[in-house]
Amino acid sequence: MEPTKPSSSNPTKTPKSNPPQRDFLTHLESYLAKRDGVDKLLKISRYATKVILSSSSLSLSPTQKTHLKSFESSVGLSRKAFRLGKFIQDVNSLRNSVTESNQDLILTLLAYGGEGVYYFIEQFVWLVKSGLIDGKHLIFLQKISAWCEFLGYFGSVGLKIKELRRIREDERCLVSSIRVAELREIGCVDDRERLIKLREKKMLKRLSVVQDLADGLMALADIRDGKGRFTGPLVLSSAGLLSAVISTHKNWLSC
């Protein structure tokens, strides 16, 4: 006996069931298993401490300030250890990148090349600060590291802005397609789902641009040795905390 075939008289599609929600502790375990997950939590801890130290509205005793500064310094050193070998990620990204124009090629070289060199040099900065290497070249290494980091963020922002333009163009096309389908009374469930995902992608890309700008501001302050406008301790600490929260949110969604 053949199985009964579904009736074709009803054109209505069966609504797709929502994916089951992941257990929080299982999700957290997956998040903490990643190097970037732990690194970003350390980043939140470090810059939240910096905000507390630089805020004039909080009255801290000398002992509390000493403890907080010691904690902030140790967390900063721990974060550098988590970056060992991370430059390989940028090397592979550079190898696998596909560029459509000379402008894209330059921005890609700046984004991945600058960030890759930054992570590579940071390994030696960590070795100096951990006491294994003589610190006589520390200032030079930090200056080169800051320049590479800044150039990397410059290229990354440029690439993401171009990607945002492409996303907005795709969004306009989808919205136009949905409107035409509605006028013709044609089902457009798939297009609506694609539009939702596209808008979520656009929001994450915008947050990523904000994150790069915040990190770029801190890199620029390092280049200028903390001099000039927008280099106050509270401003830079707040920028670092904002960047940490955004990157933590992105990593949480991706794991």
Image (tube, helix red, strand yellow):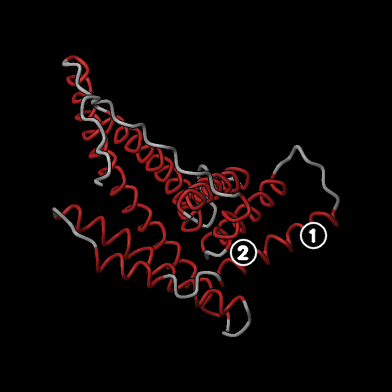
Q: Secondary structure at mark 1?
A: helix
Q: CA distance from mark 1 to mark 2?
A: 15 Å
The furthest residue to the left: 101
Depth order, front residue of 36/139: 36
Numbered mark located on residue 235 in the image: none
Residue for point 55% across, 44% down: 242
Mark 2 highlights which residue? 76
Q: Mark 2 Cα within 10 Å, few/some/many (few <14, many 20+)?
A: some
**Which residue does the image show at 69% across and 52% down from the upper left?**
49
For the image, the number of numbered tags is 2
Circles 1 and 2, Cβ within 8 Å, touching? The answer is no
Residue type at tag 1: Thr
Residue at (21, 33) in percent of width and height: 169
Nearer the observer: mark 1 or 2; the answer is 2
Tag 2 secondary structure: helix
Q: Is residue 186 above or below residue 26?
A: above
**Does residue 99 appear to the left or right of 121 in the view shown?**
left
In primary-sequence order, the first of circles 1 and 2 is 1
Residue at 79% of width from left, 59% of height from top?
66
Q: List the residue tagged with mark 1.
A: 66
Q: Is 44 positioned to the left or the right of 173 in the image?
A: right
Residue 189, horizontal then vertical, whole percent: 28, 29
Under mark 2, the amino acid is Gly
